[in-house]
Image (tube, helix red, strand yellow):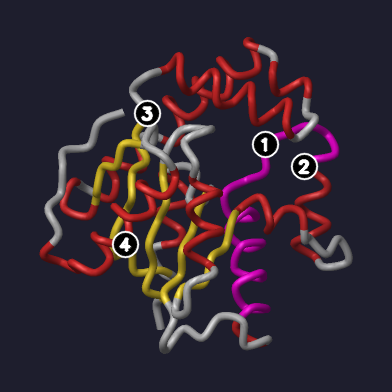
């Protein structure tokens, strides 16, 4: 059985995590953020040890291992009755991070919609990322070179995922609007179902 899924997609600082957490508090939605998956890794398991082997050396973790870790988290949520796939919709942010992961996950998820939190104003995005880094006391992340590198990775590795899922499934939302307004747009689209108007994907 494939899980009915909504993807929250966009560059770093576009508010995916904020929207995901809020949606996760609404009945019949189960939110899973990729960051939470990595934070809750059990390093005693085979896949956990494999992840540690790559990450401790600063190497890129292969897509297969990333998806296995994500699946282990989802399986645990199903077993613990946090996520009830027969009645709940899965809300993902931060995964799939690239086309390779999207292809592997095709066997596991049925993507209904991709909410593209678009932020064409790069100045606003820089300001948002700096503010978030300082608020979370992650001073390194407030560095402009670090921000530039993260956005470059998004452009080159993550953004092609939008093309992979195709325009029919993508709803473009202005991420620079207040979070409550962004949430309203998402919920309107969820309620409209397949009849929602799709805007062309932009950055």
The numbered dot on residue 119 is 3
x then y, percent, for residue 106: 38, 63
- Identify the secondary structure beneath mark 2: helix
Q: Does residue 63 appear to the left or right of 59 in the view shown?
A: left
- Identify the secondary structure beneath mark 3: loop
**Residue found 41% across the figure and 68% down from its top:** 109
How far apart, in angstroms, are the residues tagged by discs 1 and 4? 35 Å
Along the polypeptide, which appears first: circle 2 or circle 1? 2
How far apart, in angstroms, are the residues tagged by discs 2 and 4? 38 Å
The numbered dot on residue 54 is 2
Outermost residue to the top: 145
- Provide the residue designation for mark 1: 60
Camera-side mark, 4 or 3:
4
Above or below — where is 150 with respect to 19?
above
x then y, percent, for residue 171: 24, 48
Q: Does residue 97 appear to the left or right of 40 in the view shown?
A: left
Q: Does residue 36 appear to the left or right of 90 in the view shown?
A: right
For label 3, the crowd category at 10 Å Cα-Cα, with few meaning under 14, some 14 to 19 and many 20 or more, is many
User: Quick one: 150 or 1, which is closer to the camera?
Assistant: 150
- Provide the residue designation for mark 4: 187
How far apart, in angstroms, are the residues tagged by discs 1 and 3? 27 Å
**Residue found 16% across the figure and 42% down from its top:** 199
For label 2, the crowd category at 10 Å Cα-Cα, with few meaning under 14, some 14 to 19 and many 20 or more, is some
Question: Residue 113's quadrant in the figure?
Answer: bottom left
Camera-side mark, 2 or 4:
4
How far apart, in angstroms, are the residues tagged by discs 4 and 3? 19 Å
Along the polypeptide, which appears first: circle 2 or circle 3? 2
Q: Which residues are magenta?
A: 55-77
- Mark 1 near mark 4, Cβ–Cβ under 8 Å? no
- Mark 2 near mark 1, Cβ–Cβ under 8 Å? yes
């Amino acid at each position: 059985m494939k899980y009915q899924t909504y993807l929250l997609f966009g560059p770093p600082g576009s508010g995916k995590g904020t929207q995901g957490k809020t949606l996760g508090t609404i009945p019949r939605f189960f939110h899973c953020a990729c960051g939470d998956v990595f934070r809750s890794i059990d390093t005693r398991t085979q896949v956990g040890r494999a992840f540690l082997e790559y990450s401790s050396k600063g190497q890129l973790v292969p897509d297969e291992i990333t998806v296995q870790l994500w699946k282990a988290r989802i399986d645990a949520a199903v077993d613990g009755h946090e996520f009830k796939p027969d009645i709940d919709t899965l809300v993902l942010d931060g995964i799939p991070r690239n086309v390779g992961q999207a292809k592997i996950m095709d066997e596991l998820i049925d993507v209904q919609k991709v909410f593209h939190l678009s932020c064409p104003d790069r100045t606003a995005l820089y300001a948002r990322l700096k503010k978030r880094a300082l608020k979370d006391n992650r001073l390194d992340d407030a560095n402009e070179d670090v921000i530039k590198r993260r956005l470059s990775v998004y452009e080159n590795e993550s953004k092609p995922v939008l093309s992979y899922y195709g325009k029919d499934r993508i709803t473009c939302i202005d991420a620079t609007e207040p979070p409550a307004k962004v949430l309203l747009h998402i919920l309107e689209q969820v309620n409209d179902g397949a009849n929602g108007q799709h805007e062309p994907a932009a950055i």
